[in-house]
Image: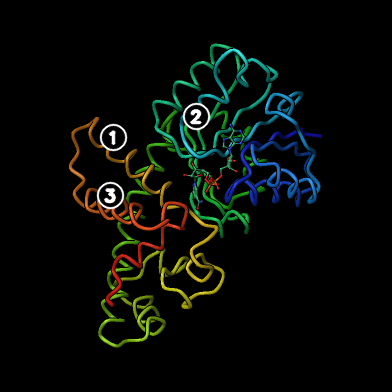
């Protein structure tokens, strides 16, 4: 049976690993937070006391960590995972990080004779729980087929954007657009509310009109309009404001490298930074940007 190691069991990694267990896979888990590990062990996972222990004998390693610094320190260095995994293992990093870091880790893996792919995801915590994520891979064609069986248990759409690092470029472009859509949708809903309209009615109108977009369909930012989204749970448990700011920094760096103008993303970055700087917003879901546009 395929042995899968899963490291990083947060808002996304937790439900992703659960879906592997639902498919009766042998999954060994590790996270710095013991309670995250315990929750997965209760669902049938095997517990590892360290990342090195988690990957021992693994055929597939999946990592889902906050940022590039976490990914590089986990994989690289004397005691990094590259020094501990079997040469035949396939390493799949699903974290959203900069393409250069993904390429750096992938190149070192290649030198050690190990396959590594960047496979960031889209679909949010809802998609992670439902197993309908979109995986955006950067790798050789052949590695897509190696990754397909395991990724198909966690996602509905698998794309290869190009070679190593291309998955991260595509993901950053997508999230740059998402940041703009969420801010724009919040602005429109708050304008309607300030003029006495019901946000649920306004949302229904836009869903059938030219303003329709993913945030209205899957992730309405106004509390009470939609069930089972972070806005109806005090903006807890989704995609944190600080992670959106990380992705906007990645987008701006990516744009700077090719001299691209990204004025919409610049505006969004200013808004999300302003929002994060206000009372305890960093760990809230990014749809809480809705509150920035509220009128007293
Ligand atoms: P999170 O902060 O909820 O989870 C990250 C987990 O990684 C935490 O449980 C943390 O303890 C663990 N971790 C950190 N360093 C570790 C290490 N060295 N070893 C083991 N565990 C470690 O973040 P998340 O929302 O799950 O996001 C993870 C990644 O996915 C980020 O790169 C994010 O940008 C991306 N992403 C998130 C969403 C979303 O909706 N939340 C959607 C798409 C992509």
Proximity of marks 2 and 1: CB atoms separated by less than 8 Å: no
Q: Vertically, is 245 above or below 5?
A: below
Ligand 1's quadrant: top right
Mark positioned earlier in the residue sequence (3 or 1) = 1
Residue behind label 1 places its C-beta within 8 angstroms of ligand 1: no
Mark positioned earlier in the residue sequence (2 or 1) = 2
Query: Residue 134: image x %, image y %?
Result: 52, 49
- Circle 1: is it few (<14), some (14-19), or many (20+) Cα within 10 Å? some
Disc 3 secondary structure class:
helix
- Circle 3: is it few (<14), some (14-19), or many (20+) Cα within 10 Å? many
Q: Which residue is mark 3?
A: 269
Q: Residue at x 75, y 46 (%)?
A: 38
Q: Is residue 213 left or right of residue 127?
A: left
Q: Which residue is mark 1?
A: 253
Residues 2 and 140: in front is: 2
Q: CA distance from mark 2 to mark 3?
A: 29 Å
Q: Which residue is mark 2?
A: 139
Q: Quadrant of residue 280?
A: bottom left
Disc 2 secondary structure class:
loop
- Circle 2: is it few (<14), some (14-19), or many (20+) Cα within 10 Å? many
Disc 1 secondary structure class:
helix
Q: Residue at x 32, y 86 (%)?
A: 197
> Closer to the camera: disc 2 or disc 1?
1
Residues 49 and 25: in front is: 49
Proximity of marks 2 and 3: CB atoms separated by less than 8 Å: no
Q: Quadrant of residue 114?
A: top right
Q: Residue at x 49, y 29 (%)?
A: 139
The quadrant of the image that shows the C terminus is bottom left
Q: Vertically, is 139 above or below 230?
A: above
């Amino acid at each position: 049976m395929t042995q899968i190691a899963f490291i990083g069991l947060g808002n996304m990694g937790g439900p992703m690993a659960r879906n592997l267990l639902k498919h009766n896979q042998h999954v060994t888990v590790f996270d710095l937070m013991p309670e995250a590990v315990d929750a997965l062990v209760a669902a049938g996972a095997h517990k590892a006391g360290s990342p090195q222990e988690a990957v021992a004998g693994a055929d597939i390693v999946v990592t889902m960590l906050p940022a590039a610094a976490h990914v590089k320190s986990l994989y690289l260095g004397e005691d990094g995972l590259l020094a501990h995994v079997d040469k035949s293992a396939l390493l799949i990093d699903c974290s959203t990080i900069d393409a250069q870091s993904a390429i750096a880790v992938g190149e070192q893996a290649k030198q050690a004779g190990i396959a590594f792919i960047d496979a960031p995801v889209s679909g949010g915590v809802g998609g992670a729980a439902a197993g309908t994520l979109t995986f955006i891979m950067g790798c050789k064609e052949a590695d897509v087929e190696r990754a397909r069986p395991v990724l198909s248990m966690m996602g509905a759409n698998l794309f290869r954007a190009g070679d190593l690092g291309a998955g991260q470029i595509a993901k950053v472009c997508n999230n740059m657009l998402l940041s703009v859509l969420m801010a724009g949708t919040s602005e429109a809903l708050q304008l309607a509310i300030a003029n006495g309209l019901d946000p649920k009615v306004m949302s229904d109108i836009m869903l059938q009109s030219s303003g329709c977009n993913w945030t209205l369909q899957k992730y309405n930012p106004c509390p009470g309009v939609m069930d089972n989204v972070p806005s109806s749970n005090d903006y807890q448990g989704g995609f944190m404001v600080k992670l959106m700011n990380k992705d906007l920094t990645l987008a701006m760096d990516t744009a700077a490298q090719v001299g691209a103008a990204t004025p919409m993303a610049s505006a969004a970055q200013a808004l999300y930074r302003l929002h994060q700087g206000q009372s305890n917003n960093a760990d809230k879901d990014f749809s809480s940007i809705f509150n920035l546009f509220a009128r007293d």
